[in-house]
Amino acid sequence: MIIQDSLWDEIEPWMLETRRNIHRFPELGLNTTKTQQLVEEALDSMGIVHTRPIAYGVKALIGPAGGNALLLRGDMDALPISEATGLPFASAIPGAMHACGHDCHTAMLLGAARYIKAHEDQLSRPIVLMFQPGEEGPGGALPMIEAGILENPPVTQAAMIHITDELSTGIIGLKEGPAMGGCDDFTITVRGKGGHGSAPHTGVDAIMVSVAMISALQVIVSREQDPLDSCVISVGTIHGGYRENVIADQVVMTGTIRTLQSTTRNRALQRVREVVDHVAGMYRARVDLVVEAGYPPTVTDVAWTRGAKNILAQQLGPDYVVDIAQPTLGVEDFAYVAERVPSAVLNVGIVGEGFTTGLHSAGLLVDEKALKFGAAAFAALALQK
Ligand SMILES: [Zn+2]
Ligand SMILES: [Zn+2]
């Protein structure tokens, strides 16, 4: 079993130190300069070739030159949160913290790289390592795909790791099919015609039209959507009007759409557009709808996910691999990879010694024993026969 290899005695402390170095200097968005440098220096020390498909992303290659490749993804960016853990290696950058665990993901992928490199002669296919910035926004996966990370060698399978506060350390959870949500935000501007509140027939009341629109939007979810296939449409803000005796000539509303499947997402977007257009037309108003497209839903490949579960059960032990029953509506830009090649998502448990609160919180303490399990899981997928 890969997890029992004594090589981890060397790799594990190195990974821990690497993770702490990354944790101390978190970087936001697409500007992961220091982290990129650390990754590249680590790869150099292992003799692994690498390139920069985009400014602050890294592509590395291990194994044979030809054949279809497996891609392993680690994200490198942090969150705009001020750390409150009091750890000796806490963030030295005010307003930035690795509160989503991407420091762990990068360290796990580097640890896996070291293990895989040491067993390079056993690889049956090329392994592409993808170190990406910008997962928390504005997105680094899509620019790296557009820069060709899935080509040369052609990538035909992919996997990513995310730490999870819902599993104990050492447990790895996998979800077959729809795993994470897609997110699209929208702004609706309703334009009516102003007038005196005592003479509504002289105007077109944008507030009344907006109320009708909000009601009609709920029907998309409650009456048109399969209740077993999640879809949420929420209007979160509404602003309009001047005073009690003036007919409002304009209302601006913003909201969000969350879905688990691309077909559902596309249909929801289309129906929102049709509904706001028709309601506006019915009541003589005009409407502008602006959609800010977010990440698509992350849907894992069922066959590859089952295959990955078998490999992990063999190489880590059957008690350490579990099924995840429910998807989440959180988003992940690995979705763009999963849209193009069969993909698996490994949720690595971090709840153990020292764990306090959940991901995206200023007090997040990760049980660092999880690093070895994540790295070993990546290595097991790479070295499968
Ligand atoms: Zn996050
Ligand atoms: Zn994350």
Image (spheres, rainbow, N blue to C red):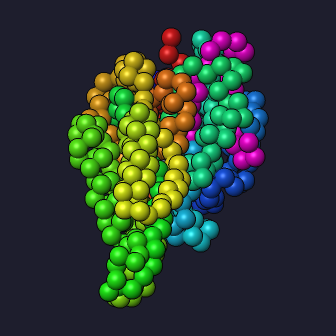
Nearest the viewer among 193 and 79 is 193
| Residue 84 x, y percent position in the rendering | 46, 70
| Residue 26 x, y percent position in the rendering | 61, 59
Query: Residue 71 colored magenta?
Result: yes
| Residue 31 x, y percent position in the rendering | 69, 55
What is the quadrant of the N terminus in the image?
top left
**What residue is drawn where x is 63% and y is 32%?**
129
Q: Above or below — where is 181 with respect to 261?
A: below
Q: Which residues are magenta?
A: 54-74
**What residue is drawn where x is 43% and y is 53%?**
277
**What residue is drawn where x is 74% and y is 37%?**
53
In the picture provided, is 95 more to the left or to the right than 41?
Answer: left
How many dots with numbers?
0
In the picture provided, is 217 more to the left or to the right than 49?
Answer: left
**What residue is drawn where x is 72% and y is 15%?**
65
Q: Above or below — where is 33 with respect to 202?
A: above
